[in-house]
Image (cartoon, rainbow, N blue to C red):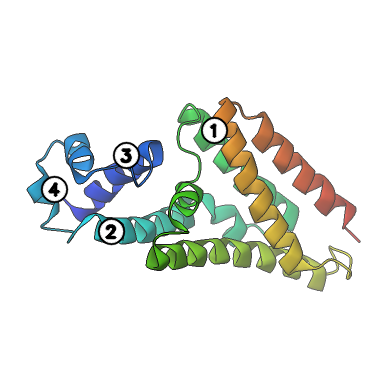
Amino acid sequence: MLTKERILQQAAKVVLVNGYANTRLEDVAAEIGVTRPNLYYHFKNKEDLLLHLIDYMEREYSLHYFKPLDEETDPIRAIVGFFNLLIENMQENDYRGGCIMGTLAQELSNNHEPLRQRIAVFFDGLRSRLNRQLLSGMQSGYFRPNMVPDKTGRWIVATLQGCLLMSKTERKSEYLMACRDSVADYLGMMKS
C-alpha cells in the first residue's frame, strides 16, 4: 500500500540527490514505482510535498540524529555524539546528500518564503537543542560562566553546515571529523 510515509521516505532520497528544482513529481513516483497521479491523493503539488517533507525530516532528525542532544547529560558527549551520527550517515550513504535542510536552504531561501521560514524553524530547533546543552553545562558549573551559549550554538550550526557541504563535495569524512574535533576542543577549553 502506498502511504504518505513511504512517499516522504523516497522523496527525501530523490530531493537530497537532485535538489528541489531538479526533482519532478515523476521522479518521486518512479522511485516508488507508481504513477504521478498516485501522488496527488496525498499531496496537492510539488510545494505541498516539500512542506510535508520538511515536517517528515524534522521528525526523522528528532528520532535519530538529535537523540544525543536530547538525552545525553554531558554537553560535550551530546554534541560529539550528534556529530558522530551525522558522520556515520554520510559514510553509509557514500557522501551523497548531506543535510537535506541545508540543501533546501541553499536552493530555496531566495525564492520560496514559506519554505524558507519552515527551514529556518528547523535550524532554530537545532540551535535551541545545542543551546540547552550549553546552558545546562554553564548552570551546572561544567562550563565557564563567560561562555555565550547562543553564539556558540550558532557557530556550531554554521560550521556543521559548511563541513557537511565540503564532505559531500569531496566525498570524505575529514571535514566533518575536523569540525567535530574542533567543536569538542573549543568546548573542552570552556570547561570550568
Residue 127 versus residue 76 in the image, above or below: below
Which residue in the structure is indicated by mark 4? 2
Circle 2 sits in a helix, a strand or a loop, which is it? helix
Is 44 placed left or right of 176 in the picture?
left
Which residue in the structure is indicated by mark 2? 47
Give the Cα distance between marks 3 and 1. Answer: 16 Å
Asked whether 97 or 74 is in front, the reply is: 97
Query: Which callout, 4 or 2, points at the residue further toward the start of the chain?
Result: 4
Q: Is residue 78 visible?
A: no
Give the Cα distance between marks 3 and 4. Answer: 17 Å
Task: Identify residue type, mark 2.
Answer: Glu
Which marked residue is nearer to the observer: mark 3 or mark 2?
2
Give the Cα distance between marks 2 and 1. Answer: 25 Å
Residue positioned 58% across, 40% down in the render: 164
Asked whether 168 or 5 is in front, the reply is: 168
Which residue in the structure is indicated by mark 3? 14
Which marked residue is nearer to the observer: mark 4 or mark 1?
1
Is 12 placed left or right of 124 in the picture?
left
Circle 4 sits in a helix, a strand or a loop, which is it? loop
Residue 141 versus residue 161 in the image, above or below: below
Task: Identify residue type, mark 3.
Answer: Val
Can you give x and y, in whole percent of width and height, for residue 56 in the image?
35, 57
Which residue in the structure is indicated by mark 1? 168
Circle 3 sits in a helix, a strand or a loop, which is it? helix
Q: Residues within 10 Å of mark 3 (few under 14, many from 20)?
A: many
Give the Cα distance between marks 4 and 2. Answer: 20 Å
Give the Cα distance between marks 4 and 1. Answer: 31 Å
Is 63 placed left or right of 187 in the picture?
left
Residue positioned 50% across, 45% down in the render: 99
Query: Which callout, 3 or 4, points at the residue further toward the start of the chain?
Result: 4
Is 59 placed left or right of 73 in the picture?
left
